[in-house]
Each structure stands twice: as structure tokens, then as C-alpha cells.
Image (cartoon, grey):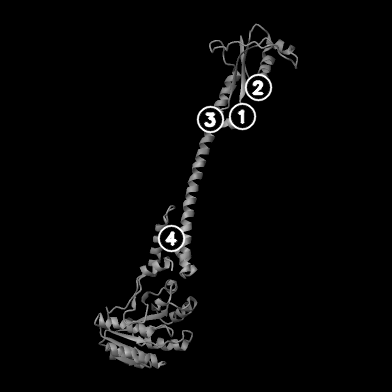
Amino acid sequence: MIIKKFQANTETEAIILAKEELGKDAIVMNIKTISPKGFYKLFRKPLVEVTAAIDDNISYKNDKAATPKKQTFPDVIYDEPASSSQAAEPNHGKESSAIEEKLNNLQNLLEKQIVEKETIKEDKKEKVKAASKNLACIQLIYNQLILNEVDEKYANQIISEIEGTLKKDSSMDNILSSIYQKIVLKLGQPNTISLKGKTPKFIFFIGPTGVGKTTTIAKIASKFKVEEKAKVAFLTSDTYRIAAVEQLRTYANILGIPLKVVYNIDEMEQSRKEFADFDVVFVDTAGRSHRNKYQRDDIEGLMKAIPENEREIYLVLSATTKYRDLVTITEAYSEMVGYNLIFTKLDETSSVGNLFNIRMLTNAPLSYATFGQDVPDDIDRIDPQSIAKQLLRGH
């Protein structure tokens, strides 16, 4: 007996194939539906498989040749399917199984690749999500810095320096803490007047008119006189304003300290000898225009009358001055000497962005800040932590 399997889209088509191949005497032994497996079920329709048999004594080839191309079949005779012991699998069935196995292996490989790609895709989504969250937090903080009048150049510098140090899933608190610490580091520790080392120390106060130099001098001198019991003296070269000399004389009388007016370099050199046994000498200079080179040269000449290791320079600026003007002022004075920064009138502004900007622009150390007219109370050393907090919070 010859047994063969035939597959087609429908049962009728499969039987036709069997009759064409085996002849009209072929007997249908089994009919089953074969569904594609796994990945291929998305692209293939189920097939019908017919198992047919014919007695090997019958020449089915001749019958096949005699069979008209178009024919109808009589009733098909069905029989029980043959067992594996009764029939051997035809060669084309083995080939089909081998192909199917290869296709299944390919399917497994494709499915594995799809899973891996989906995993990578999800990982990328999470990373992008975390990065977007970081970016949103950073943008909020950046906007706050700009709102508090930090120059865009310096705000961008801070952000660029901390971005590379952040984890992908950093919290708002971590990002805020990183930026806070960066600001504190950039502000640096304040450089204030110390009586350590060689004395006397001549402390020069320079700056434009109207920023409160004389009052600032009185506040600092009071603390040294009262709190540190230092031997203090006043000098003033501000002979252009009688009111300025009288104001400083009033403070000198209250504190019980000497005051001397100097008009030129020779008198400054003489004052150095005269106050040789003092701890500190505070020098009030005229509030000259920073645009006038000759006036700046006069002040510079007086300062250079004192050896460099015996003098300190403090540039007094108002926190209420426009940033553009502060840039011009600091650049003009930077041509003269190195200086420390004092900011006045912090009580008259809601923003401390200019303190940070000028510190970044000049790289000059911060020192004192004043916040009122009361002598000696309304002055203190600049606190970097406090400034950083003000820059990062709303008004």
C-alpha cells in the first residue's frame, strides 16, 4: 500500500491533489487541520492535510494520466487512519518537518531579538524619562537664579558644571543641594580685616560717591575699638567734601580716636610714622568718579605711599547699583590695585544677584555687607551660605 499526505487551503483541494497523484481508487484515511505555530500564525492561514492511500498493485500513474483535467468525484471512501507501524512517512514529509524545524528555530531567534530590542527600548525610555525629570528640575532652579538677577553667563556656568555630576534619577533635593554647594564654593570664604601679622595696618576704603564709605568705616572701626580693644586711628583724604570730614570727625569723637586729614603723598608717609604704634588705621578716600583717570591716579598715589605688606584695599559698592554700572566701576578700579569687596545697602534691595555677579567677574574676595544706618550694629561679614540660599529661593 502506498500512503501519502497532501496539504491545501481547503479539504476539497487536498482531496483533488490526492486523486490527481494516486488515482481515482485512492482512499482518504485521515483529514486534519494544521495551524501555523508561534510567530508564523500572524502571516499564514491554517492548512488542511489529507492522508490518502492506494493499493500498490494498482498503477495509479496510468489512472492519473487517464483522469480528465476537470473532473468530479464520486463519494469519497473514508477509512481509519493508518498507524505508524503500517505506513512510512514519505520523503517530502521529512523534508517538510526539517523545514518547519528550521523555521521554528528562526522564529525563536527573532522572538529573542524582539524581546531584547523591547528591553533596550524600555531602558532608553527610563533613561530619557529620568533625564527629562532632571532637566525640568534644573530649568526651575535656573529660572530662579535669573529671577534673582544672576547673570545668564554665570547661571549657565553653574548648571553646566553640576550636570555631569548628577545621577540619571537624581531627586529635586539632590539637584538643589548640588547647585547650592556650587554657589557657596564660588562665593568663597570672606576675607575680613585681621590684626594678625605686622602692624599698624592701613585699611583703605575706595569707591564711588554715595555708597556709604564713611559710615562703613565707622561701623568697622567701632567693632575693633569696642570688641577687640584695638588701638585705632582715622585718616581722610576726602578734602573735596567738608561734610565728609565732619562726619568722620563726629565718629572719631564718639569713639575717642584720633583723626588726621592728609592732602598729599608726603603727608601720608608722615602719617605712617606718626601712627606707628597703632594697631589699625582706617583711611577714608574721596568718592572720585571712576571714569576720571586723574582722580583715580591721586588715590592710587596715596595708597602706594604705604608699603604693600602694610595695607589692605576695600572697594565699597552699593547693592542697589545697576549691574552694568557695577561692571564699569570694578573694571576701572581693578586697573589700580587688587581689592576686597564690601557691599552696602542690602536692606534696600530684594536681590543679591549682583553680589554673586561681581564676585564672579572680578574674582575679588567678598568681605563685609551693611544693611542699615545703625553704627556699629548694621554690618557683618558676608555669609556665603546665606547668599546662596537667597539666590535659590523666591522673594
Within-10-Å neighbours for mark 4: few <14, some 14–19, many 20+: some
Please provide percent x and percent y for residue 332: 46, 81
Please say whether residue 237 is visible from this viewpoint: no
Q: Mark 4 is on which residue type?
A: Ile
Q: Which corner quadrant of the image does residue 14 belong to?
A: top right
User: Is residue 127 depicted above or below 3 in this figure?
Assistant: below
Q: Nearer the viewer, mark 3 or mark 4?
A: 4
Q: Residue at x 37, y 69 (%)?
A: 386
Mark earlier in primary sequence (4, 1): 1
Q: Mark 1 is on which residue type?
A: Arg
| Residue 3 falls left or right of residue 311 | right
Q: CA distance from mark 3 to mark 4?
A: 50 Å
Mark earlier in primary sequence (2, 1): 2
Q: Secondary structure at mark 3?
A: helix
Q: Mark 3 is on which residue type?
A: Asn
**Of 234 and 254, which appears nearest the observer?**
254
Mark earlier in primary sequence (2, 3): 2
Q: Mark 2 is on which residue type?
A: Thr
Residue designated by label 4: 162
Q: CA distance from mark 2 to mark 1?
A: 14 Å
Q: Residue furthest left?
A: 229
Question: Residue 105: which numbered mark, if any?
Answer: 3
| Residue 327 falls left or right of residue 227 | right
Question: Residue 10: which numbered mark, if any?
Answer: 2
Q: CA distance from mark 1 to mark 3?
A: 17 Å
Question: Residue 44: which numbered mark, if any?
Answer: 1
Q: Residue at x 48, y 46 (%)?
A: 123
Please say whether residue 381 is visible from this viewpoint: yes
Q: CA distance from mark 4 to mark 2?
A: 69 Å
Are the residues at dot 4 and dot 1 in contact (C-beta closer than 8 Å)?
Answer: no
Please provide percent x and percent y for residue 329: 46, 80
Please provide percent x and percent y for residue 111: 53, 35
